[in-house]
Image (cartoon, rainbow, N blue to C red):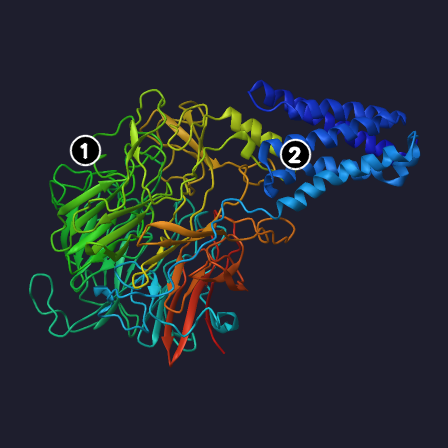
């Protein structure tokens, strides 16, 4: 008996031990006994191989046949689910078929060897056949023509060549009428210019340090901000820096966020008036509005980058005024405000899952010229519009809106996607007053801040399933004429479609029973609204859907799955551990969707990534009150939730080797026909190239942070995936047309503009701390040669 054969036998025995022990554990939890049975057969195979007995090949041939039949019965011809079921048994089979091992064992006939080889080829053939099948993809097409829909009112003051707001306009369309770049020539795009901010995220910055900016373009300038809220003005043709402004943000690693998704722009009209009717100050005819993570807001002269002296206190205002909690980093302006003719409407983020004593999530309207507070809407207050005074402060811990708002100045309404009252995962001590508007879309009067209507997308939210995205406004063509609609993507994967005048549903969202049984002291809502326009998975996960690099970590994922509580979406958190799918990061995030109102279509990039939520009772390692002045600087891991009976451990549902337990795909790009509200095509997007130790570009469909941008040239652009690429797709079919390698992670939403007769596509590539992508400081513009 040779050494190599003994090594092969030893490997087989070790594999048998692992599968037997793990398989018995899984079977005891109600899972498949396949792993235990296979483990026993591997033990016997290893024993006989060590002894040089032909029985080793008989037994292993049985394993190959049995595994093939079982795998096809469990998951059919699904490549990603078959691969971890076959990889180990095929590799061990190849080792046994090597001549050195065949010589060590006396087989009665060559026929036995040939039959063994045939059985070994069987799972390989099944894998090859499975590549011919697609799962969860939709092959279809969107309408080619624009139809007879008139341009929307929001474009009146935005030249086709420009991009004046985060979503180009206050409607949040994320689309451009430019058409120089088309599906026929997009493959010719080359880098036109690259700008580096030199704002490098360092070891002393928070984990949630990110470069998520979408630049603006006005006239011949591009405006953007970097993670430390430095603002830059660049030449739109060359990318050369014109000016830079540093607000002096002194961040701290205990802050939960360090990010700037963008700045806002305002142009002073002729004979401009302040909100109280006085003549507007003569300075800063065009101004850039910058919120900061330390709770301030600046107005800058767009020509020079200098603060506008007549705005607040020499160009800045303190957004912590009126708050009961003023600790820096507890209230952060991570998203740019909506700016209307006379008003800056500002929302902000608070520290998630730290305590019940947090700053207010109040929404405020400020005079765009003077910075004077005009109105406030406090969603947790009995008097929603009470202004702060010596005897009144904003309600602590009222629901906040951390993402981007939209506005329709013609209707006089601003649309607020409201989030949660933190802590997010425990609601036993919430009041009906505090929960009126959680996870809701709320329309406020631009002039007064008074609520006009609201629609709640999740009742008694215990999963942080808020509205994370800027709503998109579309003048929707229907059989009854044009209806002003609003599209609100939710973390649940639902897209809620309402009449933006009244808040009445356009696409039905029937209330549907959901799992019950909250942790002690809490409760759950009996039903939740499910929009009929949704990307939420149609089937609940089962342990058969678990994945892995090998059958070993797949087995561990199946064991973990069986140990958690999971009854589908909205399974309540508990001390056992709850599988949350879609996970807390959401199927949609701050990037939102892109809509082409003329073609009446939308492009979305949903993802399906699971999290685990486990409530932790108070104890020595989980005290009921804070021991330090600042919270931990992360949204992942153990969160203290001071003021409640529990802390919570939040983390992605990963295998022991760091891969997501549920099988891919995890991320898609999809096209929606807004005339029918049907998903017409959907394709996985993103590869494993930058997410694995070896740069293997398997197209599995990766998680994403950021959104899409669509052009009238019939092309949509995306840079949000975990691999470092910018990609272009055919809007009609979703076919990938072009890609280019980015120097860092592209967790941002691209934009486009034209200057000097040339169309540019611009994206930020700087990575995302907790997402684990490569960090950098790049802003890259592409154009045709």
Q: Position of residue 228 (x, y in %)?
A: 39, 57
Q: Position of residue 147 (x, y in %)?
A: 30, 65
Q: Is residue 741 left or right of residue 377?
A: right
Q: Mark 2: which secondary structure?
A: helix
Crowdedness near tag 1: few (<14), some (14–19) or many (≥20) residues, C-alpha within 10 Å: few
Q: Quadrant of the N terminus?
A: top right
Q: Residue at label 1?
A: 433
Pick the front one: 615 or 152: 152
Pick the front one: 779 or 495: 495
Q: Mark 1: which secondary structure?
A: loop
Q: What is the number of the mark on residue 312?
A: none
> Which residue appears farthest toward the top when viewing the image?
28
Q: Verify CB contact (< 8 Å) between mark 1 and mark 2.
A: no
Q: Nearer the viewer, mark 1 or mark 2?
A: 2
- The Cα–Cα distance between marks 1 and 2, rounded to whole angstroms, is 50 Å
> Which residue appears farthest toward the front when viewing the image?
479
- Quarter of the image for residue 750 reads bottom left
Q: Position of residue 742 (x, y in %)?
A: 53, 62
Residue at 58%, 37% (x, y): give it.
547
Q: Is residue 513 left or right of residue 779?
A: left
Q: Position of residue 559 (x, y in %)?
A: 57, 27
Q: Residue at label 2?
A: 551
The disc, 1 or 2, on the residue closer to the chain's N-terminal end is 1
Residue at 22%, 44% (x, y): give it.
323
Looking at the image, residue 283 lies above or below residue 248: below
Residue 555 appears in view: yes
Crowdedness near tag 2: few (<14), some (14–19) or many (≥20) residues, C-alpha within 10 Å: many
Pick the front one: 704 or 595: 595
> Which residue appears farthest toward the bottom when viewing the image?
756
Residue at 14%, 45% (x, y): give it.
388
């Amino acid at each position: 008996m040779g050494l190599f054969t003994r090594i092969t036998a030893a490997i087989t025995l070790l594999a048998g031990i692992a599968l037997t022990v793990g398989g018995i554990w899984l079977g005891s939890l109600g899972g498949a006994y396949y792993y235990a049975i296979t483990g026993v057969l591997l033990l016997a195979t290893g024993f006989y191989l060590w002894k040089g007995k032909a029985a080793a090949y008989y037994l292993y041939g049985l394993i190959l046949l049995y595994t093939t039949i079982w795998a096809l019965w469990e998951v059919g011809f699904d490549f990603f689910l078959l691969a971890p079921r076959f990889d180990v048994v095929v590799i061990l089979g190849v080792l046994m078929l090597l001549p050195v091992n065949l010589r060590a064992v006396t087989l009665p006939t060559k026929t036995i060897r040939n039959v063994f080889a045939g059985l070994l080829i069987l799972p390989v053939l099944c894998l090859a056949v499975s590549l011919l099948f697609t799962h969860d993809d939709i092959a279809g097409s969107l309408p080619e023509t624009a139809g007879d829909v008139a341009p929307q009112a929001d474009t009146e003051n935005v030249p086709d060549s420009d991009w004046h707001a985060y979503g180009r306009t206050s409607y949040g369309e994320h689309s451009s009428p430019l058409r120089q770049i088309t599906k026929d020539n997009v493959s010719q795009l080359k880098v036109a210019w690259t700008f580096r901010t030199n704002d490098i995220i360092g070891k002393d910055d928070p984990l949630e340090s990110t470069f998520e900016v979408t630049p603006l373009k006005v006239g011949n300038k591009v405006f953007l901000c970097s993670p430390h809220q430095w603002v830059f003005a660049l030449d739109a043709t060359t990318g050369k820096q014109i000016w830079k402004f540093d607000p002096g943000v002194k961040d701290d690693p205990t802050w939960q966020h360090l990010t700037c998704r963008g700045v806002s722009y305002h142009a002073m009209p002729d004979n401009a008036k302040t909100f109280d009717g006085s003549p507007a100050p003569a300075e800063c005819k065009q101004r850039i509005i910058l919120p900061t993570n330390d709770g301030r807001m600046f107005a800058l002269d767009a020509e020079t980058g200098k603060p506008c002296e007549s705005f607040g206190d020499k160009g800045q205002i303190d957004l912590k005024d009126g708050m009961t909690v003023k600790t820096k980093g507890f209230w952060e302006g991570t998203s740019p405000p909506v700016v209307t003719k006379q008003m800056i409407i500002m929302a902000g983020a608070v520290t998630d899952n730290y305590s019940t004593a947090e700053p207010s999530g109040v929404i405020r309207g400020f005079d765009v010229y003077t910075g004077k507070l005009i109105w406030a809407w406090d969603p947790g207050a009995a008097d929603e519009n009470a202004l702060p005074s010596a005897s009144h402060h904003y309600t602590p811990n009222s629901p906040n809106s951390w993402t981007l708002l939209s506005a329709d100045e013609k209707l006089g309404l601003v649309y607020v996607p409201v989030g949660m009252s933190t802590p997010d995962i425990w609601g036993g001590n919430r009041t009906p007053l505090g929960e009126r508007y959680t996870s809701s879309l709320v329309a406020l009067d631009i002039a007064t801040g008074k609520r006009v209507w609201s629609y709640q997308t999740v009742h008694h939210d215990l999963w942080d399933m808020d509205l994370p995205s800027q709503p998109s406004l579309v003048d929707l063509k229907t059989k009854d004429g044009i209806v002003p609609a609003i599209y609100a993507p939710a973390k649940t994967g639902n897209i809620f479609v309402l009449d933006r005048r009244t808040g009445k549903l356009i696409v039905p969202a029937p209330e549907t029973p959901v799992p019950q049984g909250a942790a002690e002291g809490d409760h759950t809502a009996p039903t939740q609204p499910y929009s009929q326009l949704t990307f939420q998975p149609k089937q609940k996960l089962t342990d058969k859907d678990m994945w892995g690099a090998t059958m070993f970590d797949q087995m561990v994922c199946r064991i973990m799955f069986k140990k958690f509580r999971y009854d589908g979406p909205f399974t309540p958190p508990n001390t056992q551990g709850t599988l949350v799918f879609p996970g807390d990061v959401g199927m949609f995030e701050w990037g939102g969707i892109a809509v082409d109102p003329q073609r009446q279509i939308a492009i979305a990039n949903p993802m399906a990534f699971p999290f685990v939520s486990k409530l932790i009772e108070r104890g020595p390692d989980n005290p009921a009150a804070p021991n330090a002045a600042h919270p931990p600087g992360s949204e992942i891991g153990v969160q203290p939730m001071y003021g409640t009976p529990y802390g919570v451990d939040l983390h992605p549902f990963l295998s022991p080797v760091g891969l997501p337990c549920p099988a891919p795909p995890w991320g898609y790009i999809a096209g929606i026909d807004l005339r029918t509200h049907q998903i017409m095509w959907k394709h996985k997007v993103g590869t494993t190239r930058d997410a694995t130790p070896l740069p293997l570009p398997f197209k599995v469909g990766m998680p994403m942070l950021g959104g899409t941008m669509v052009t009238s040239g019939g092309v949509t652009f995306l840079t949000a995936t975990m691999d470092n690429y910018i990609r272009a797709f055919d809007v009609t079919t979703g076919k990938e047309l072009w890609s280019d390698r980015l120097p860092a992670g592209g967790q941002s939403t691209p934009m486009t503009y034209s200057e000097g007769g040339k169309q540019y596509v611009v994206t930020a590539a700087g990575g995302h701390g907790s997402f684990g992508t490569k960090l950098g400081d790049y802003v890259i513009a592409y154009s045709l040669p």
